[in-house]
Image (cartoon, rainbow, N blue to C red):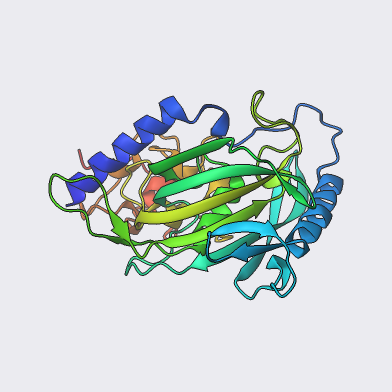
Amino acid sequence: MVKFKYILLLSILTLLVYSCGDDGIPGPAVDPNFDHAAQAVKDNDSLVLFLKNHYYDLSSSTVKPIETGKTSLFEDPKLVTQNITETINDNEVDYKLYAYIATEGKSAKGNPSVVDSVLVNYSGQKIVNTKTISSSVFDSNTNTWFVLGGGVIRGWSYGIPNLIAGVNNTMPNEPLSFEDVGKGVLFLPSGLAYRNLGTGNSIFPNEILMFYVELNDIIVDTDSDLDGVPSILEDIDKDGIPWNDDTDGDGTPNFLDPDDDGDLVLSIREDANEDGNPANDFSDPNNTSLPDYLNRVIRNSNR
């Protein structure tokens, strides 16, 4: 089972390397003077009005303009509001992400972490203004694996963990099939999508986006870099976001770096007791709280 899990993860990562393209996380803005904080306030004002002007129609499972007698999304108890702080060009920017939980999934696996692998169906539309959604879908797919935290927009990494996965009832030699999946809608400010960059084709700078998402399945405790430490546990500073932890300062966060301390020994090999978990090996008598795989002084290898 463990071997299969690693092969599956490697396949997912390979697919992402060749397919994520413009769907990856945007880098620093081209314009260093762009006011991301002001844009975040503007986006949130628009999102609040949009949510007040729309409701979720259960019969069609879609977001529609508000009607008499309907409860607006903004007042619907199924709407989750997340306060998120991102660092952009060394400045902290505060965002609000809104997630509507239409259906609770029933998988015993529960909710994914912000860096787990997820199997989703999704479709995305633009929020044109406070009363209008784009008539066309700019992107959609079914039964597609993504690794949260890397290769997807931040709004997905923060928003999808609000959902619970479904139950896999796939029969042998049959197409994938799930029931009781978690369903929701993500409403993303531009700063948690493609910021002031856009994608160069379908999405313009500073566009607010809406995604319908169905969470079919997840890989609990995904180990994206196959170093023996689950990605979510590579959150060294314990702030809940592993993508800002980079022990060796090489620009690759620990959860995607197979050599976390940059000592030229793979982290998976710095496993002195050979139990498959490098995080519980402490060989430095002068620093007994720092595991070997994060300690550049220690270059023990069990292979």
Q: Residue at x 77, y 64 (%)?
A: 52
* Residue at the front extreme of this rendering: 68
Residue 118: image location, x then y, percent: 40, 50
Quadrant placement of the C terminus: top left
Horizontal relation, residue 282 to residue 6: left or right: right
- For the residue pair 296 and 141, the one nearer the viewer reads as 141
Observer able to see residue 199: yes
Q: Residue 95 location in percent, x, y?
A: 73, 55
Question: How far from the left and from the top, in percent, is residue 247?
Answer: 52, 44
Work out whether residue 266 or residue 41 is closer to the camera in this orientation and state it.
Answer: 41
- Give the residue displayed 59% in from the left and 35% down from the top: 138
- 119 or 124: nearer the eye? 124
Q: Is residue 20 left or right of residue 167?
A: right
| Rendered position, 66 above or below 32 | below
Say if residue 237 shows up in the picture.
Answer: no
Rendering coords of residue 215 (x, y %)? 42, 56
Number of disc labels: 0
Q: Is residue 292 left or right of residue 137?
A: left
